[in-house]
Image (spheres, grey):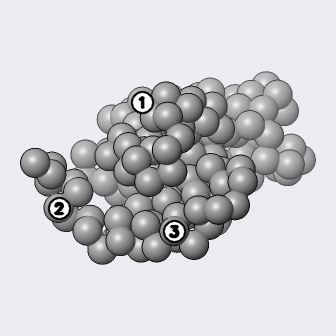
Amino acid sequence: MQNDFVQLKQKEFAELKEYIDSVKNVQGILMQTLQKAQDIFGYLPLEVQKFISDETNIPLADIYGVVTFYTQFTIEEKGKHTIGVCLGTACYVKGSQEIIDKIADELDVKVGQTTEDKLFTLEATRCLGCCGLAPVMVVDEDVYGKVDSKKVPEIIAKYRN
Ligand code: FES
């Protein structure tokens, strides 16, 4: 019997199958296939990993290993907005942990989690390459530099509507 997720996402699974069929005879397509699947579904739950395993004959354990190894892949459904706080050295010494704690408190989530209303996902990131702006936080594509933890509620409020 199919579970709810598979029932609900029939269109997405059909699109993924079409992609897999188009690259079936190409070697080393796992990374591209996972990326494509993540583009389609937004994340890679076990049902999607199983489907890829069945369609490609790549063992599920291998797929799971790749998905959990590379940070570009996510198993959890993400919120509408992703908040990233840099924990690179420059940001860390300028207090980015305090910013993370403030956001976690404000949203009632831990790092890596998504709020219950699926609006925000909180992530810690590595150096974002703009250390001069430390401490840095990003919301989706928007970069905030020299962030003061007191400003966190104001920044988050912009994305609530
Ligand atoms: S350490 Fe945060 S941007 Fe480089």
Quarter that holds the C terminus:
bottom left
Instruction: For marks 1 and 3, give the one nearer the viewer.
Output: 3
Under mark 2, the amino acid is Gln
Q: Which residue is painted at 63% across and 31% down in the image?
A: 69
Q: What is the CA distance from the residue labelled 2 to the residue labelled 1?
A: 31 Å
Mark carried by residue 21? 3
Q: Is residue 76 left or right of residue 72?
A: left
Q: Is residue 94 visible?
A: no
Is any part of residue 19 visible from this angle? yes
Work out whether 159 lies above or below 85: below
Residue 44: percent from left, percent from top: 44, 48
Q: Residue furthest left?
A: 1
Q: Earlier in the sequence, mark 3 or mark 2?
A: 2
- Identify the element where label 3 is drawn: helix
- Looking at this rendering, what residue extends furthest in the right direction? 132
Q: Amino acid at mark 1?
A: Lys
